[in-house]
Each structure stands twice: as structure tokens, then as C-alpha cells.
Amino acid sequence: MSLFKNVTAKPWERKGVIGGLEPEGAFESPNEKVALSIFLVVASVVFSLFTVGYILRMELPDWRPLSEPTQLWFNTALLVLSSILFQWARNITKNDQEKNIRVAFFGAGAFAILFIVGQLITWDNLQNAGYFLTSNPANSFYYLMTGLHAIHLLGGLWVWSKSSIRLLSGGEPKDIKLSIELCTLYWHFLLIVWLVLFALLSNT
Amino acid sequence: MAYVPLADQDHEMEMHHPHSFVEKYVWSQDHKVIAIQYGGLAVFTGIVGLVLSLLFRMQLGFPDTASFIDPNFYYQAVTMHGMIMVVYLLTALFLGGFGNYMIPLMCGARDMVFPFLNMLSVWVFLLSVIILMASFFVSGGPTGGGWTLYPPQTNLAGTPGHDMGIVLMLVSLAVFIVAATMGGLNYVVTVLQYRCRGLTMMRLPLTVWGIFVATLLALFAFPALLVSAIMMLFDILLGTSFFMPAIIESGSPLDHNGGSPILFQHLFWFFGHPEVYIVALPAFGLVSDVLSVHARKNIFGYRMMVWAIIAIGGLSFIVWAHHMYVSGMHPYFGFFFATTTLIIAVPTALKVYNWILTLWEGDIRLNAPMYFAIGFIFTFIHGGITGLFLGNVVIDLPLSDSYFVVAHFHMVMGVSPVLVVFAAIYHWYPKITGRMFHEGMAKLHFWCTFLGTYAIYLPMHYLGFLGVPRRYYALGTTDFIPASAQDLNTTITIAALFVGASQLLFFINVFWSLRNGPKADPNPWGAASLEWQTPDTPPVHGNWGDSLPTVYRWAYDYSVPGAEQDFIPQNTPEEEGPTMNDDGTDKEA
């Protein structure tokens, strides 16, 4: 990559235009995608730090593990479907096709909404079963981490709904090509985060 | 698509040219206006922090003379002073202020990559400042738990501001982090993607490198503060026990159980230590450029300087627990953090040597910015070396809760970055405003600030050796503190009041020169980097007129043998200036 080739350069020696006629840019991707990738690293740091906090807090004697509801498996399936549909939508626009784009794109968002509804139902069930936020740190972490994940997903859904409105009000699929690509990346990231969280929560 | 060629966006830029006053100066998406907004707001907040420090210094120097400074107010003032200066003044000023102004100009871009996000960032920053300031007006006042906000003490009834004050502080920090992340993504992507033709990463001025790496640190370190703020808000508002242990308050047990205050400390300092370098790295970059320009020499060891910035940035994530030696830890753990702390001194010392070697045999012009830059080298060496003492566990333990630490961190991350701020403002003032400042007043400002801050902090080291504890509202009578310590405290307070008042020189100079200063030359110092080569001074919206610049050389071609002038601007084609070999001999262009 040009970024790393250049950092070993001796700038005081070489004069003239380096890199031909094009302006300098470290990455081929659109700027929005570079920004999103960096944001995903930032979000990973946030989730990692919560995980570290979780593991350290777990060591203390008052920790009573929470038995995760089986409904989480169902919710996970919803999120996986959402991610798959986004990938499908991305593949369609990448190949400059239009067929089925609405099914894939709207479906992807719909499954994500269902996932959040599912998570809320899980919260409700836990409350009814007496697992309150403050009754144990394991519960506190459960609500905190699933809530944080859902908030991230809602942020993604905001972008999704803006693009959906554009698509519904006569926009062409190619107009939202970048938006679809970014949503797909973001959804895959949130799916991975969810799988890690799910594994962590259900094994401890 | 490596880059959206901005020349192609000229048409679009044209359409976005603001016309009304509100569009131009309030809801502006121009990086230069946003920089001034960020900087102005940061400096305003900093003045509040300065006044608070003078108030609590009054109590220390002249105990019980001002009736409104009771213990509660004293702790609130100390806490707010610390948090304001570190986060709301220095971080916002270096990244939001200088980052915004310098990055697009030094990269030869028309603006940031995401101008709207940039505008949003400054308004969210304003929101965080409003929330912070609101805590002065709520019942109970702002938090007085110390700027580190350690639970459980911060949340207990004995601490001032334990109800609303701490909540507002945490919310304000969370909002600030949102603003910093929006700005930070912009700065990083702009440096990566919006460099003009020929401007490789290794041709960037060190200012951009410093701000770039500091922004990455901010992006990856602020999440730790966000995480601890969220968990602490849960503890306070919802009654969870992430950090709050079982505890008895005024005789009755609280609802919390089993939380870990040490966990908070780890999270806080995982943010807190990189924060030191979020402030220091931009200062390193800015001062390198000021020194090089006014010494008429290329910066010594450019590549080494870049790698040192990167190395310091990386290492800053694995030294945090040296702030926690007194909290108690496994000896091997302490050993590890003492070692990494000493290792980080290596690239830092390297930078100091390179600054001094840049001055060596330079054609030094003692302009006002250069005074501040050289002053910085003194204060930074001073504060850095006491840091080496404190990095060792056995030396830290007796000194940690004394004034020695106060002296250390004020020299290294208070006075030093602030001297660079002044150096940079005086240095770039002609470009930003199109006017020259009053040189004599700026130099007087330097001597008052430089000698004044030494008069404040040098005696504090001695107070620390005596064992005078920090954070105390009143010293009382002890066997080991002589009565003369009070005389020293009085002296320090007088010096602090003097330094505080002498900052008026700066503000008078800056505002008076805006209208009355002589018109500035577009490049009064003869600097080679791109921001001095704009067609207009001050640069207008879009920065570069019809076409973007092309860069043919690095930013440090000063005193090149055989060249007509003693500097060659970065956008001068190679035919017009001969270049040097490694050994300094001429090379035919």
C-alpha cells in the first residue's frame, strides 16, 4: 500500500511530483467508507472495553450468572437474515442490477427491526422473571450491553430509513449504491459484535 | 477512486458559497470559521478554568480571607479547573482549533472531507460546554470529587455536587466525546484522502503528523472515558453496582453492593494517559514547525520525528497504571508499567534532542513565536524529567499525594502546551487575520508568562519534597511542615495572580491588532509549508482560488545552498531550486 511505501521515504532527497498526476489519497475506497471503517474500530474499542469490564467484574464474589433466554437464538437468526439480505442488496447494486433490490433492501431493514423487537421482548421476559437491572451485576451488564448494541443498530436503521425513503420516492437503486454498501459493512460488523456478545453472555 | 478530485467539485463549492452573515459566521461549514469557533469557545472555557484556579490559590496563599471560598467551593473549583483545562481547553483547542485550521491548508485541500459533520462537531461541543457550565447553577453546585471523578467518593453525600453536579459532568463528557469523534473522523480522513497532488505522507509538516496521531489517540482513548461515564451514570441514576462497593453513608448502608472502584480507575486512566499525549503530540508538531521556520533550518531528523510521534502514540496506551501506584497493585504489574513509562521517555527525549539540534547553527530569528517555542523546550525538559522520577514506583509512592506531582504535571502538560499555543497563535496570526500583532507586547507577554509560571511551579517541587499534601483546603499544623511553607504558598499565589493578569496582554494584543495592526505580508516569516502559499490572506472560502496547489518538495527546504531565497515553498517546481544530498552537498536539479 502506498501509505507504507511512503513512510520509509527520505523526503529531503526526492523532489518533484511523486505519484503521478493524481492527487494523493491513501485508500482507494470512497471517503465515507474510510470514515466508517475507522468508526467501526472506535466502536470495537467501546465494546471491547465493556467486555473487559464484564470479565473483571465477573471475578468478584457477588456475581450471579444470568441464564440467557433461549429466545436469543431466534433473535440471532433474525440478525443473520438481516445481514444476508444486505449482502444480497449490495451484490445486486454492485453488478448494476435492479431486480429484487427492493425486496432485499427493505427485507434487510425489516429483519433488523424484528431483531430489536425481539430483544425488547427478551428484556420484558427477564423483567417478569425477576431479573432486574440492579439485582445483580450480571443483569446490569446484560441490559447495558444488549442496549448499547441495539442503539448502534438503531443508528444504522436511521441511515437505512433515509435511503428507503429515497428509494420509495422514485429514486434509482444506483443513487443509494454507496449507502447500501456502507449499511452492509455496518450490519456485518454489528452481527459479529452480537455473536461475540452472545457467546460471552451465554457462556458466563 | 483514490480521491474525489476537488478541482472537479469547484462547481459544487461555488454553489455552497455562503452569503448572509449567519451562514458565514454562525452556521458555517468552512473549516477556518469552525476552527475559530472551536478555539474561541475553548479559550472562553479556559478563562473560566483560569479564574477558578486563581480563586482556590487565594485560599492557599491567604487562608480564610475570602469568605465565599469554603471547603466545598474549594474542591469544586479544583475539580472544575482540572477537567476544564485538560479536556475543554487543551483537547478542544489543539484538535478542534488548530486541527481544523491547519489540516486542510497544510494538506492543500479546500476543506475537510465532511464539512457538515465538522459543523455539527462544533455545535455539539458547544452543547457539552453549556451542560458543563450548567452544573455551576444547579443545587449542590458542580462536582468536587477531583477531576479523576473516582467513585465511590464522588457519589457520596460528603462530596460537594454528588447529586446533580457529577451527573452533569458525566453527561457533558459523553457529549464532548461525541463531538470529538465527529471531528476526529474528519481530521483523520482528510489527512488520509485529501492531500493535494505530490503531497505524500512523508512530505507533511510535523504539525499535521502531530494532530493526525493525536486524533487517532483521541478516537481510541475517549471510548474508555465514555464507557466509564455510562457505567457510572448507571450506578448513580439507576442504582447498579458496576463501580460502587457496599458502603455505609452517614450511618446507613447504601443499596450498592460489590462494585469495583479499581475498575473505574483502570478505565479512567486508560483514557487519561493517552489524553496527556492527545495534548502533547499536537504541541510537539506545532512547535517543530515554529522552531524550524524561525531557525531558518530544516527540522533535524524529520523521519525520526515522525516515527517518534507514532511510537509515543502507541506506547501511550500501555503506561496508564503508573497513575495508580498508590491504589496498590501486584509488584510485577507495577514493574511492567514503570518500565513502559521509562521506555516512552526514549522517543520523547529524541524529539527534544532534535529540537535543540534544529536550533544548532541555525540562523535564529528571535521573533515572538520563537521566544515561546524556545521557552517550551525549557519547561518541557523540566516537566519531563520530573516525570521520570514519578514513573518509578518507589519514588512515586511518597511523592504521589504531594505538591511535587502538581508541579510535575503542570510543567509538562499545563505550561508547556500553553506556551506552544501562544507560539502557534502568534506564528499563524498574520495568516489567520491578515494583520501583524504588536511584537513588543507579545515579548512582554512571554517574559511574564515564562518567568511567572516558573515562579509558581518551581517552589511547588520543594513543597512536595517537604511533604506538603496536595488537595488540602487548609494545611493545619503538623510536625513536618514548617511554618515557612505558608510563606512559599503566599508567594506562589502572588505569582499566579500576576501570571493570570498578564494574560490580558495576550488578549489586548490579539483584539487590538485585529483592527490596528499593520497589514501582514502573505508570508511574513518566509515559511515553506503550504498554508503560507494561499492566494489570499487571510485565506477565503475554498482556500486555493481556481486550482489546487501541487507539491514538489517537503515542508522544510530552508537555507538551501544556491537557492535565491532562504526558503523554497513546497509548491515551487524542482527546476527553481537545487536540492541537497544527504551530506548537505548540492545536487543538480
Image (cartoon, coloured by chain):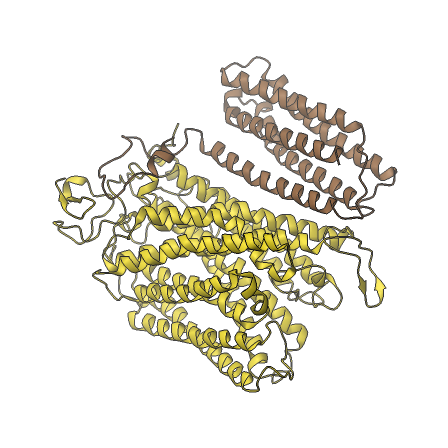
Chain colours: A brown, B yellow
Q: Is residue A15 left or right of residue B211?
A: left
Q: Judge whether A198 appears above or below B56 on screen.
A: above
User: Quadrant of residue B94 in the image?
Assistant: bottom left
Q: Is residue B356 left or right of residue B31?
A: left
Q: Position of residue B183 (x, y in %)?
A: 49, 46
In depth, the one of A74 and A138 nearer the eye is A138
Q: Quadrant of the N terminus of chain B?
A: top left
Q: Position of residue B303 (x, y in %)?
A: 32, 46
Q: Position of residue B101 (x, y in %)?
A: 39, 51
User: Quadrant of residue B248 in the image?
Assistant: bottom right
Q: Judge whether B86 appears above or below A198 on screen.
A: below
In depth, the one of B353 and A126 nearer the eye is B353
View extreme (right): residue: A129
Query: Quick check: can you spot residue B541?
Result: no
User: Quadrant of residue B11 in the image?
Assistant: top left
The residue that appears at 21% across and 61% down in the rendered structure is B361
The residue that appears at 60% across and 85% down in the rendered structure is B65
The residue that appears at 65% across and 73% down in the rendered structure is B73
Q: Quadrant of the C terminus of chain B?
A: top left
In depth, the one of A37 and A32 nearer the eye is A37
In depth, the one of B333 and B504 nearer the eye is B333
Q: Judge whether B375 appears above or below A143 on screen.
A: below
Query: Quick check: can you spot residue B496?
Result: yes
